Amino acid sequence: MPTTQTSTLLLTLLLAIGLVFFLRAASKDRTTVVEVHSPKPALEVMEGLCTWLESRGWIRDGGDAERCLLEYRGRVASSNPLAALLSLLGGVGAGCLGLVLRELNPSLGWWPVSLVLLGPLAGWVYSRRAARQEGIQIRLIEPAPQEGSTLRLRAHRDELIALELALGEPLDLASDGSLLSSPI
């Protein structure tokens, strides 16, 4: 087997491996815990958070009064444009692999090019893994009197960023800023 064909096969297989890792990363659980503080009373902050979450489609799923905990749940949908892009990339990559296999072994005929039909499998896998139940936990941490309120939030990283951007000013929420300073 000539070195150009070997290197082409190797690069094509590396692209396939990259697609697999991208699929895993796109549907990875990114649950994060962050503490936020507000000089406002806990009741006002909790009402503002609950109203905002319910307006975004989150459903109250109980809680624990003794632990000062509220829980919400919601169904997170996958991104249809991303699923289409992954299907396209999977199809192109599988087609390239088929062409490389055909070039390496011409006796196979043109059937390896039919690997392009596996392309939609990438979008399907992403859609199945990314669409899932998510939860948000809000826990009131007992501060000293006259110090406002401190909350511990446990949720998907993107939801926490949206919460911080939307409610940061109205509720005077302050965190360590790590969510908004991420390089991603």
Image: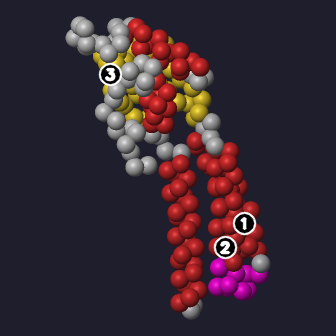
Mark 2, secondary structure of its residue: helix
What segment is highlighted magenta in the picture?
100-109
Q: Amino acid at mark 3?
A: His
Q: Earlier in the sequence, mark 1 or mark 3?
A: 3
Q: Is 124 above or below relative to 77?
A: below
Say which quarter of the image contains residue 66: top left
Q: Is residue 61 visible?
A: no
Q: Amino acid at mark 1?
A: Val
Residue bearing mark 2: 96
Q: CA distance from mark 3 to mark 2?
A: 53 Å
Instruction: Identify the mark at residue 71; answer none if there is no mark.
Output: none
Within 10 Å of disc 1 (Cα), the crowding (few <14, some 14-19, many 20+) is many
Q: Is 78 contained in the magenta span?
A: no
Quadrant location of the N terminus in the rendered image: bottom right
Magenta span dominant secondary structure: helix
Residue bearing mark 3: 37
Q: Is 132 above or below relative to 11?
A: above
Q: Residue at x 52, y 70 (%)?
A: 14
Q: Amino acid at mark 2?
A: Cys
Mark 3, secondary structure of its residue: strand
Residue bearing mark 1: 116
